[in-house]
Amino acid sequence: MAPGLHEFLLRVKSLFRRRHMDREMAEELEFHQAMLRQRLLRQGIPAEEVDLATQRAFGDGARWHERLCELWQFRTLENVLRDVSFSARLLRKSPGFTAVALLTLALGVGANTAVFSLINGLLLRLLPVPHAEQLAVLRMEEGGPQPNYAFCTPFFRSLEARHDVFADVFAYNPDTLQVQGRSANENIHGMLVSGQFFRALQTAPLLGRYLTPDDDRRGGSPAGLAVVISEHFWESWFNRAPDVVGRKLVIANVPFTVVGVMPKRFIGADPTERPQIFAPLSADPIIDAPRNHINDGIHAWWLTVGARLQPGVTLAQANASLFTVSNPILHEASNDASFIVDEEKGHFHFAAEPGSRGFTYARLLFRRPLVAMFAMCGGILLLACLNLASLLMARGAARERELATRLAIGATRGRLVQQLLVESLLIAALGTGAGLTAAPLVSGALAALLMSGNSGVQLDTPLDLRVFGFAALIAVASALLIGLVPALQATAGNVNDHIKDGQHARQPYERRKILPRVLLASEVALALVLVVGAGLLATSLLRLYRSGVGFDPKGVVNIAFSMDKQQLEGDALMRLYQELGEGLSQQPGVKSVSFQFIVPLSHLHWTGQYSAPGGSPQRFNMNSVGPNYFATMRIPLDQGREFRWTDSKASGLKMILNQSAAKLLFPGEEALGQQVTNVGEKTSYEVVAVVGDTKYSDMRAPAPPAGYVPMMQDEQKKPSLHAVVRVDGPQGPLASAARSLAARLAPAIPAPTFTTMDEVLNNSMNAERMMALLAVFFAGCALLVTAIGLYGTLAYATARRTSEIGIRMALGAQRTRVMAMVFGENALVAAAGLGAGLVAALFASRALASFLYGTSPRDPWVLVGSVAALIVIASAASLLPALRAARIEPMAAIRYE
Amino acid sequence: MLREENAGELIQGTLEMLILKALARGRLHGYAVAEWIQQTSQQVLKVEEGALYPALHRLELRGLLQAEWGASENNRRAKFYQLTTEGRKRLNAESHRWARLSAAVAFVMQAS
């Protein structure tokens, strides 16, 4: 052990055994005296003189004892402990200051830690698998602005067979599985995974085995179809039965054998997924029936592909190898010449990127909003620190006399700085502690807000080592920021002057002190930047809401029925839907009911290519809807009629176009009654109505052209549709009514799920909503903190000038003049801060431009409003001390001295 | 630091070296250390209690000595000191240094 460390540990130990050690030292010295006395007796000193002789020989025992005590003292640590208890006493004495300090700091640290743990969870954390650094994520470059991460089956199967640079190549697709429960099928969140998936992720199963390439074959391995379940599912579905391996699960009406259980920590390769069941990719035709992504070949882009590099192979080597195989694989995948030409035009090639953190689309969506939010949080923390620094500085000024006295009686400046620093460290530690306690709650709520509307998807925000490190870092940084400047400032200057002057009238008011004002002005500037940012984001969100969607979302409820695994199809299924609709319309408060295939703004797409007679083919969005749909959604029906239950397949194909689609297909013509042709299938549709435009999948984009076909003429055999119900009044009872209705009319299907259109709309603006919400909250806090800072410093400064103001008034100064003088102190600072802040805001808001909808980053109303808000806040904060100054009684103030 | 009949300037740390040497043969309490030094030096070096105990405690703090309580020869509780591995190493180094130093001084003094 290093001698320094040994000594440190012994000293620390001695701190806690102070009394014990004291006794031991005394005993040791006594023993020595006793021995000495014995020797003297032996040497023949008479008994009556021996005490005196011993003492003479031994010297001053008490002094030796003291010397030993000094030797063992832990000077630095004892000083620190003394400082801590002194600081704690001081903080307790001014509870107002302490509360403000702790709250602002807790807010800053809490917000930063919360957003950082989101960033950590989404962007930084490694997948919990061995040697995650060897993992890669594959993508396709097709000449578009963004790379494509969604693969089709043929590409993946070709890549999977190659092992030159990759040890394993795997693909997966998150899916909803219909598992047979006690009474009906239940929807369970799961994942289809390819044969090398588990081998690549190298996590041992808890029970049984994992899926292998043998399982990833049509019909499964010779032993039959297999699935692996999660520990969580093992618990909830099988009650942790030890004999679960070998049991059957009926998925999509087909029995699968459970061959293994994966431990809780295993989440696959997507950090936001928590699959309950892992099924082989080749079972897709069963599980997703009647769809078949595998047969769809190059028309189904449904797989996320990852890989584990061969040991010793670098990413660059892998990329070089992928580049050379790209073209052969492209030609292998399809003989569709136009597809190949298209892809070759875009210099199609595969590429690999680091995959140690897995892959999630959430990352592409939320990276920039999170970074923007992180910047905002940094701003609020800086603001909190500036505020505390200026408050501490003002307090330090009030304590000048105390500090000067201590300097005069021999304290070193370093010692005083240490004591003041300990005070700010104490504030920082308490504030950070409070912030850290709140952070997990906040980050959990934010993660839920961000991910809401994506069922089965979640974002973990654990307080891991990285988050703690980050929190510690900002705690120390803010403590230094808060404490160092005020401490140095307070202990500088001439001792003599301070003691003589104290806080009396003779002291010239220090106009030269520029630092506190700079701090306050930057606080105002920073607050303005935050308020402008919040104003812009909130305005943008409001405009987004107001921009309208083309239908009336208020009071509309979507009820999803999964019909793909039950027996009925075609017209019989339509009759079931009709019965369901009639049942729903009899529920209390229901005004009208219809059906739709795609819920607008739920990010699902269906496009078709159609042409007018003699016109060029046009691609636009499609939906399949029921009778009375446009009335239910309150989409204006400009011409023609709604679909009817009688529009069956036998009655001739019908279509309804929205205005944009009508204009696109029949520019300058009447669309109603015309025929349109499906370019691929050569089928012809009669246009029976033209309706208003609605937004389809993107809130921010203008309403695109769209066509509607009747659900009765849907190409799918067993379409799973959403009932759209317009309800007046509470929507709660409808959910249970829908469930019992479904259980009665279609007992085999999973319980229908229930979402309001308002939720759908909100979810499509998650990132915007969260940013605006946080920004407005932070702006509110920034205003409050700035007000406290302005008020606090001015109040301290004015209190110190009481006798000066008293003299001024005794000499005839008007009360209004005194008020103006005090008020003017802050007005100057605020004006400077506002000027600087405005310039900074103009630069900073440019970074927000890409988040804004229909709002310029220099929106004059927002800028004017923000400046006005700060002026109001600053005036209010400065008025109170000014009023108090004006109320000073000259006689009392002068006598006070 | 040391009281001696013809007190010469003793080099700093010499007392510590003497203490280490005293403890080289086994554990001793403070009184015994002082006595051993006094007797072995033919009563020339007399260790003052005010210096002895701070030196012992300093060595203990630095990890060169280890202390424990035990019964003395007259059955009283006493604090015994004993060399640690570190202490033994230090004693070795100090002895070499001292031998070289005293030889050098002797050479100088004998020069004619």
Image (cartoon, coloured by chain):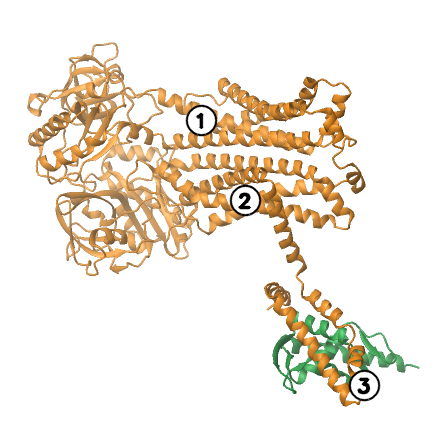
Chain colours: A orange, B green
Determine contact: label 2, label 3, CB under 8 Å: no
Determine contact: label 1, label 2, CB under 8 Å: no
Identify residue for label 1.
Answer: A537
Task: Give residue A185's mark.
Answer: none
1 and 2 marks on the same chain: yes
Name the chain under label 2.
A
Residue A414 is situated, as x and y percent measured from the top left of the image, at 71, 49
Identify residue for label 2.
Answer: A474
Name the chain under label 3.
B
Mark 2 Cα shell of 10 Å, populated few (<14), some (14-19), many (≥20): many
* Front of the two marks 2 and 3: 3
Task: Give the left or right position of residue B86, taking residue A352 as reference.
Answer: right
Identify residue for label 3.
Answer: B43
Query: Where does the C terminus of chain A fall, quadrant-wise?
Result: top right
Mark 3 Cα shell of 10 Å, populated few (<14), some (14-19), many (≥20): few
- Relative vertical location of residue A85 with respect to residue A140 in this rendering, above or below: below
Q: Amino acid at mark 2?
A: Ile
Q: Amino acid at mark 3?
A: Gln
SS at circle 1: helix
